[in-house]
């Protein structure tokens, strides 16, 4: 189990420069596909929150790469990899990714505020 | 101001029609009455408007709708003000628009509510607006009485305040709204009314002649595309108010009631146990607020005669009946600024939507346009003391204040709004950033208009029909073929209707235009086929007549398949309750569903003649470069885009992902050759031929084209 310090947590929660933002979308009927750009993990969390009227659109391989290369959160990236390897429908994968991101952001926030937390 | 002409009230004698068309001659503030009978064969809405434009526009070569010679028509259909389901409240606007590239085409827009119904109850099927008023005016029409009023005190006001001011002005006895005396007491035997007038007006965006200027009616009803707000602004026309106490004669009321009840019985939604996995347009449960609103307590708000009520009045009061795209375009930015606070996000998004309506702004271009501007800001190109100077602070993007500032500068042509008011693509060119349009950074694929949310590289029918007409087609006939399988597969469910079954169901509806289900094979190797071409022709003809002229609501019709009905058969064209059944019941005519499509073809050909006179050539019908040169790599974020495809080897149908492709320029040009030929247009120019025009009874049109050297050559 690796300890994470507040500096690293704050780093993972930082806002990225524009050129590293992640593009995702939502499908809305009848409007079609709506684009959105994600600047940080915290923004990712609420942006991919499932809603009743829209379908979150994201490619998990791109998300995984973004987490590795842009955010630098290899633990969360590996979690996404594990989720996308599961043989479950896309919507369930999206929900699982959302849960994982949500949990991760909550932990990072606590650590960033100097609470002592260990990776599960 | 006194009106110069007198009206003789002539109650409608044509079933479904009021019987008269009002021609407002703004230049000398007079008006005339045109008998509807002469134009009855054009149906209503788009067809009626186009025929009137042809007859009343003295110079069809103009390329910018902000011109004294431009004629704008606001038209109803026989269905308006009747109980035809989801058809009684639409209203069509036509004329030369403003803001498309390379030329502002003769175009159309459409809005809902109760305006067209009230127009007919007042005794008018349409209003033709020609000339330019010498000063700002608004027009009051109460039954047969037409009065021009000075609009100096309204100029500068938002659409909400404008309508309230007109309501007050018409409250002649100052009693607040109640029993209002009608001008010319005794007209139709009615002296007082509690009816509230229906008003169509412009806000500052129209007054300042911005490309994004809309016409707005009540709350949340707007004709956005085409820049008709700017056209009215140029004409010094602030508003037209209708109040009517009449009614519409229905040729066969029982046939209408029977068809309506049968439709309810077969396709209606069981509200006790709604089928949330229903496939089809007519029998679906649907609300059109997209941002997550923190309340489900809504009162359905419907256009007149609609059985759906897709707009909402929420108990929390956000939004003022705003709906559809305007409730989503700012949502992500608002969420970002509110750090994910859903309530704040909803509140700001809905307020911004309402602010768009108040300024009379079309919100659609802002969706991709703001994304582009934000990119320029972050790249250090746009901002204070930057290459492109602006006082807007994009660090505040997502706040209510930022949105208001952005929308205000566009509506008032201030700051970068001076440029944006001409259109986002035009702005990119002016700023030396044409490449942003060419490479798809700015997602505006056709005619300088924003992508609707359906990429033409994947959803080709939407793109083909848009580029072969004059604007983003915004007609959702085939979208369920994408929505339904895509959502089902995303949820891990077996699609409720198999690809094999659905293509047969739809192809049956498209006959005799198509031979079989191959018209719906969205495989890359089939999209330029004759069958897809025929499907596109059906799509244009259907939308031109049944949707834009008969004015069936786009969000309910066409119903090409429907799981509410036995055999999953949709209502479109059905001999018991299809479009033509309602048409015949209301008008007393006896047309077939396909007759309606032929009327759509005729309308399209007349419009092609207008485009030819405006200077259109087939070479103009081209997508932005990125549609041909870049694969649809939006697929980087969008995991799949399912459409029916037929396996060439096995002959089996399946829903397949059609992302990751671009169109082929050469193949599409060759497709256009065949399309023009099939339509009776000269493939070299795209202009109508004499034979085609004469066959359609448009010999006079041929003469005018010939006089301008714009008659297409015969094959």
Image (spheres, rainbow, N blue to C red):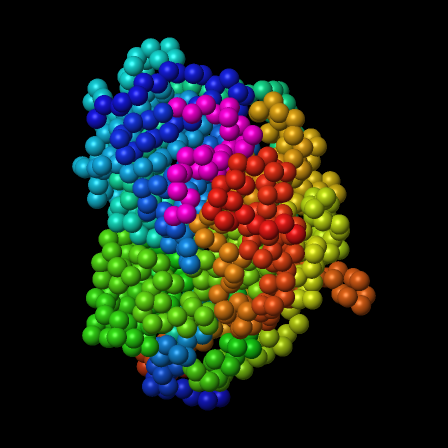
**Percent x, y of residue B530:** 70, 56
**Percent x, y of residue B587:** 57, 24
**Percent x, y of residue B519:** 70, 54
Q: Is residue B629 left or right of residue B572?
A: left
Residue B57 is a magenta residue: yes
The magenta segment: B33-62
Q: Residue at x 39, y 57 (%)?
A: B365
Outermost left residue: B153
**Percent x, y of residue B633:** 54, 72
Check the image and report above or below for B570 versus B446: above
Q: Residue at x 56, y 30 (%)?
A: B41
Q: Is residue B159 left or right of residue B699?
A: left
Check the image and report above or below for B509 versus B163: below
Is residue B192 visible in the rendered image? The answer is: yes
Check the image and report above or below for B187 versus B94: above
Q: Main secondary structure of the magenta part?
A: helix
Residue B367 is a magenta residue: no
Q: Residue at x 35, y 13 (%)?
A: B187
């Amino acid at each position: 189990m690796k300890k994470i310090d507040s500096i690293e947590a704050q780093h993972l929660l930082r806002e990225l420069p524009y050129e590293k933002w992640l593009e995702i979308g939502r499908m809305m009927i009848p409007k079609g596909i709506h684009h959105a750009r994600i600047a940080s993990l915290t923004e990712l969390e609420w942006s991919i929150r499932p809603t009743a009227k829209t379908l979150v659109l994201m490619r998990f391989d791109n998300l995984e790469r973004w987490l590795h290369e842009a955010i630098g959160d290899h633990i969360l990236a590996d979690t996404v990899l594990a989720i996308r390897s599961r043989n479950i429908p896309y919507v369930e994968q999206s929900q699982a990714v959302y849960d994982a991101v949500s949990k991760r952001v909550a932990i990072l926030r606590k650590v960033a505020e100097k609470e002592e937390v260990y990776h599960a | 101001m006194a009106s110069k002409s007198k009206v003789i009230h002539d109650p409608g004698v044509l079933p479904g029609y009021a019987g008269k068309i009002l021609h407002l001659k703004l230049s000398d503030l007079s008006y005339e009455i045109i008998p509807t009978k002469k134009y009855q064969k054009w149906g209503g809405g788009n067809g009626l408007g186009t025929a009137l434009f042809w007859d009343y526009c003295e110079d069809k070569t103009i390329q910018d709708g902000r011109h004294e010679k431009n004629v704008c028509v606001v038209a109803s259909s026989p269905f308006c003000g009747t109980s035809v389901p989801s058809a009684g409240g639409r209203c069509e606007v036509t004329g030369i628009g403003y803001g498309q590239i390379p030329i502002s085409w003769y175009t159309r827009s459409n809005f809902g509510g109760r305006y067209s119904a009230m127009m007919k109850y007042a005794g008018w099927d349409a209003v033709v607006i020609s000339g330019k008023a010498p000063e700002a005016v608004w027009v009051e029409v109460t039954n047969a009485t037409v009065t021009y009023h000075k609009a100096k005190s309204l100029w500068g006001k938002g659409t909400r305040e404008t309508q309230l001011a007109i309501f007050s002005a018409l409250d002649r006895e100052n009693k607040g709204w109640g029993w209002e005396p009608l001008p010319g007491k005794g007209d139709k035997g009615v002296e007082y009314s509690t009816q509230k007038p229906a008003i169509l007006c412009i806000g500052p965006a129209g007054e300042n002649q911005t490309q994004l200027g809309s016409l707005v009616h009540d709350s949340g009803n707007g004709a956005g595309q085409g820049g008709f707000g700017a056209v009215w602004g140029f004409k010094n026309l602030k508003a037209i108010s209708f109040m009517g106490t009449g009614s519409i004669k229905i040729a066969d009321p029982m046939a209408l009631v029977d068809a309506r009840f049968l439709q309810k019985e077969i396709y209606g939604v069981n509200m006790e146990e709604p089928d949330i996995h229903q496939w089809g347009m007519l029998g679906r449960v649907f609300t059109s607020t997209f941002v997550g609103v923190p309340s489900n307590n809504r009162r359905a708000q419907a256009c007149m005669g609609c059985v759906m009520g897709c707009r909402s009045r929420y108990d929390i009061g956000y939004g003022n009946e705003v709906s559809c795209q305007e409730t989503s375009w700012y949502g992500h930015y608002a969420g970002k600024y509110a750090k994910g606070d859903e309530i704040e996000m909803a509140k700001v998004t809905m307020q911004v939507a309402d602010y768009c309506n108040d300024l009379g702004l079309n919100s659609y271009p802002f969706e991709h346009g703001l994304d582009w501007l934000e990119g320029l800001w972050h790249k250090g190109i746009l901002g204070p003391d930057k290459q492109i100077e602006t006082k807007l602070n994009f660090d505040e993007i997502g706040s209510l204040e930022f949105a208001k500032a952005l929308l205000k500068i566009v509506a008032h042509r201030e700051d970068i709004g001076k440029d944006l008011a001409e259109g986002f693509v035009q702005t990119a060119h002016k700023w030396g950033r044409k490449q942003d349009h060419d490479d798809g950074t700015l997602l505006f694929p056709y005619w300088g208009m924003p992508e609707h949310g359906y990429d033409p590289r994947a959803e080709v029918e939407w793109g083909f029909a848009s580029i072969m007409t004059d604007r983003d087609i915004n007609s959702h006939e085939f979208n369920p073929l994408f929505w339904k399988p895509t959502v089902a597969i995303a949820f891990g469910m077996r699609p409720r209707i198999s690809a094999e079954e659905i293509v047969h169901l739809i192809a049956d509806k498209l006959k005799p235009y198509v031979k079989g289900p191959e018209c719906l094979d969205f495989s890359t190797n089939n999209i330029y086929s004759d069958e897809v071409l025929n499907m596109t022709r059906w799509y244009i003809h259907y939308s031109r007549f049944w949707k834009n002229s008969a004015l069936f609501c786009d969000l309910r019709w066409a119903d090409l398949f429907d799981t509410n009905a036995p055999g999953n058969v949709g209502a479109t064209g059905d001999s018991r309750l299809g479009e033509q059944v309602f048409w015949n019941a209301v008008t007393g005519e006896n047309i077939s569903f396909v007759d309606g499509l032929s009327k759509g073809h005729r309308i399209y050909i007349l419009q092609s003649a207008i485009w030819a006179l405006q200077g259109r050539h087939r070479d103009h019908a081209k997508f932005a470069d990125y549609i041909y040169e870049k694969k649809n790599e939006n697929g980087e974020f969008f995991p799949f885009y399912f459409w029916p495809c037929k396996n060439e080897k096995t002959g089996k149908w399946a829903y397949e992902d059609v992302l990751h492709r671009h169109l082929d320029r050469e193949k599409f040009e060759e497709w256009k050759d065949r399309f023009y030929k099939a339509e009776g247009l000269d493939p070299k120019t795209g202009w109508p031929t004499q034979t085609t025009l004469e066959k359609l009874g448009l010999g006079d049109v041929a003469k005018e084209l010939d006089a301008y050297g714009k008659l297409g050559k015969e094959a």
